Amino acid sequence: MRERRTQLGFGVTVLLGTGDGTFTRSMSLGLPERIIHLGDRVLIHGYEETYKSFVVLSMAHAIATGTPWLGEFVTGQPRNVGIIQTEMRNPGLGERLKKIYGDSAPPDRIKFFSRKMLDELRRTSPMENQFSLIRKWVRKEKLEVVLVDVISDLFCCGKNPDKERDVSFVFDQLELIPEVKVWVMIRHDSKPKENPDGNSNNRIRGSSEWKENPDTILHLTKDGRSDTVKVSVGKLRYGRKPNPFSIRYDQKAATIVPGNPVLWLLLKGPLSREQLIEECRVRYAAGESRVDKWLGEVKSELSESHDGHKKIFTRTAPPSADLLWKFQKSDEQTG
């Protein structure tokens, strides 16, 4: 039976009714802060070209290195993270990782379910035996967080991701791998247009169990006419749902960053206005007026100094998810 949790205050989770019947109190993993908590099953869904795979890779990097996701969501201590990537095989995955890490290897704490293991998984039946292979991998690598892109590809042997009983069976199998504290699963939407009733959860393809079983549901959708993707929290079982925020793709870093990227760019140190304009041109094809708009939005979180005639901007705000929601307005093309 799933653990029942009641969130008490910021970043603290109470676990009620653990395996031996005792009451325990522990810190949330903060994966990321205010969205994912200890013990959560997370579903991320969206249509094509909404950066789902980039969300997986960037979140895995943040959790494995203990660095803030998107520069703002605090993740705590580094943890071992596993990625089961079913759609993208080499050379595609290898090429994407090379863009992100260059000639360096991914962090040691990120473990990929290899192509050889994936081929073995697909030859294995029944489905219980497939999850036994995953459990063996989890224990060998001492994984605490596992991301599956995409979860529906694990269905086999007569199991169907559109049938409620079969989807419930998969979630039951996840519970049999208690070493994994957080599962993050990718699922495709059935259609690109907004659902008529306005509930993004109803865009999830297949059985209604995909909406009932997860603790947190994140929805990715193209943000109007802009070049950003909107991240909406469709479900948050143990907290109040926050407002949407936006993300965009960074061509130079080969990852996703906040819709307004200025604070993210300043994480490594001060930059002049001219340097920011050049960085934003290369990374986001953004013009001067657009960069000035972004600077104006986040000016309360910056200090400004001068080097001769040049304006130098320094980030003064520590990492905080509140900053994403504070500057989450849709970003239309302005330059």
Image: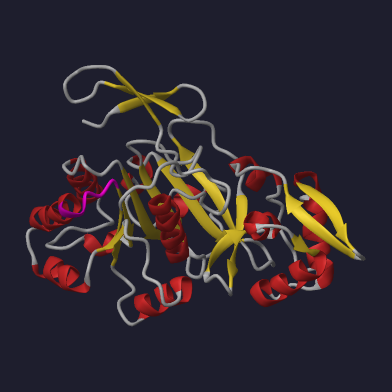
- Considering only vertical position in the picture, is 232 above or below 40? below
- Would you say residue 193 is visible in this rendering? no
Image color mode: secondary structure
- For the N terminus, which image quadrant? top left
- Considering only vertical position in the picture, is 173 above or below 92? above
Q: Is residue 160 left or right of residue 88?
A: left
**Image quarter for residue 265?**
bottom right
Residue shown at 50%/40% (left/top)?
33
Residue shown at 13%/61% (left/top)?
158
Residue shown at 74%/72% (left/top)?
286
Q: Position of residue 241 (x, y in %)?
A: 54, 37
Q: Position of residue 232 (x, y in %)?
A: 55, 49
Q: Main secondary structure of the magenta part?
A: loop
Q: Is residue 229 magenta?
A: no
**Image quarter for residue 270?**
bottom right
Residue shown at 32%/36% (left/top)?
39
Q: Is residue 313 left or right of residue 194?
A: right
Q: Is residue 207 left or right of residue 288?
A: left
Q: Is residue 277 left or right of residue 71?
A: right
- Considering only vertical position in the picture, is 50 above or below 218? below
Q: Position of residue 101 (x, y in %)?
A: 44, 71
**Image quarter for residue 168?**
top left
- Would you say residue 25 is visible in this rendering? yes
Span of residues in magenta: 140-144
